[in-house]
Amino acid sequence: MNNWNEYLSSQGAQLATDGSGHVPDFGHALTVAELASGFVAAITDQALLAVSGDDAATFLHNQLTNDVEHLGLADLRLAGYCTPKGRLQATFLMWRGSESVFLQLARDIAPALQKRLSMFVMRAKAKFSDAGGTMVLLGIGGAGAEAALLPLFGALPATPYSRIDHPLGTLLRVADVFGAPRYQWLATPEAAQAAWPALASALRPAGTDAWRLSEIHAGVPQVTLRTQEQFVPQMVNFELLGGVNFKKGCYPGQEIVARSQYLGKLKRRTALATINAPAQAGNEVFAADDPDQPCGMIVNSAPNGAGGVDALVEMKLAAIEQGNVHLGSASGVPLRMLPMPYALDALDL
């Protein structure tokens, strides 16, 4: 991994000064228009856990918000892990290999989350391990993504939330954005380094901030350390993205998640906004007509290449509809609402 970071640095990557190996960007934050044309990003804020053993799928099925037992080998799914009160402790991108179920999550919560889930394994034949330590993750998206990847893989996953295994690694197709597909490529450092020159020639090279911006515009939230236990899944639109299965069996918080779905109208959702100021996950936002208490919280944010950030912001539906929302206080920097890539109405699941 150190060699990979050194290589990225030699290619113009900006490395974090804390020694973490985090790659925010390649000298400047990409704009939405630049993302839409095509980009390749070194993603460094994600961890990957493998859960192996005869009972791995059954164990996770009883812990997570989505169906794990019927997860096909070519499928991807979102899933959450809740407290008994229904609040998300983590969100995952999940897939299944021949011997393990893989959970991709925010790196800053991975060690504690792995420890917590392992406490409940008990007699089940399921074992957690770090599956990402020797691999690197690239994100590829925008109009030029398919043409750049086809020479490497020959064939690509055909639909969002599907995957293929290849001698070069695992290729995941995640939620589309800007009218084009997006992919994550889990590769060895050697394979990634060999492919980088061609990818960076065809696409704009970028870091984690660019990938996070693309996730935000796809409307896909991720729980991080700053937002653990803040949201019931529906508050971050998770069931709209297929991250909750209401027909599966029990899991921690299931009763509250189901009650939120079926008893009464949902009063909070997550919307897309642009903010002409620095802002990060966990920052509160305020509506002008109710200045004494926050109406919501930033879920994820990323630099937008225009001097501010774009963000997914969880808030009261009334605040979303009125649009007069401000960062930090009712007199703070205003949020400008942007169209979401999907409707915020609850689906009939």
Image: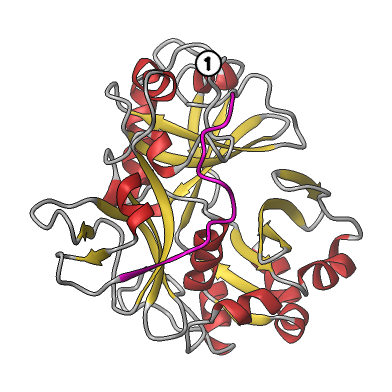
Q: In the image as oriented, which residue stretches furthest toward the left?
A: 292
Q: Is residue 3 left or right of residue 88?
A: right
Q: Is residue 342 magenta?
A: yes
Residue of label 1: 125
Residue 306 is left or right of residue 276, and the answer is right
Region of the chain picked out in magenta, as a range: 335-349
Above or below: residue 282 compared with residue 22: above
Query: In this orientation, does residue 82 appear?
Result: yes
Q: Nearer the viewer, residue 270 or 251?
A: 270
Which residue is depicted at the point 41% across and 43% down?
A: 236
Query: In front here: 39 or 271?
Result: 271
Give residue 143's quadrant in the image: bottom right
Q: Amino acid at mark 1?
A: Lys
Residue 319 on image: x %, y %: 30, 52
Picture residue at 66% right of the left edge, 74% below the top: 36
Label 1 CA crowd tier, 10 Å (few <14, some 14–19, many 20+):
some
Answer with left or right where residue 247 lies relative to residue 197.
left
Q: Position of residue 35 (x, y in %)?
A: 62, 76
Q: Indicate whether 35 appears above or below 79.
A: below
Question: Image quadrant for the C terminus?
Answer: top right
> Quadrant of residue 194 in the image?
bottom right
Whole-percent x and y of residue 78?
56, 38
Is residue 166 toward the left or the right of residue 185 in the image? right
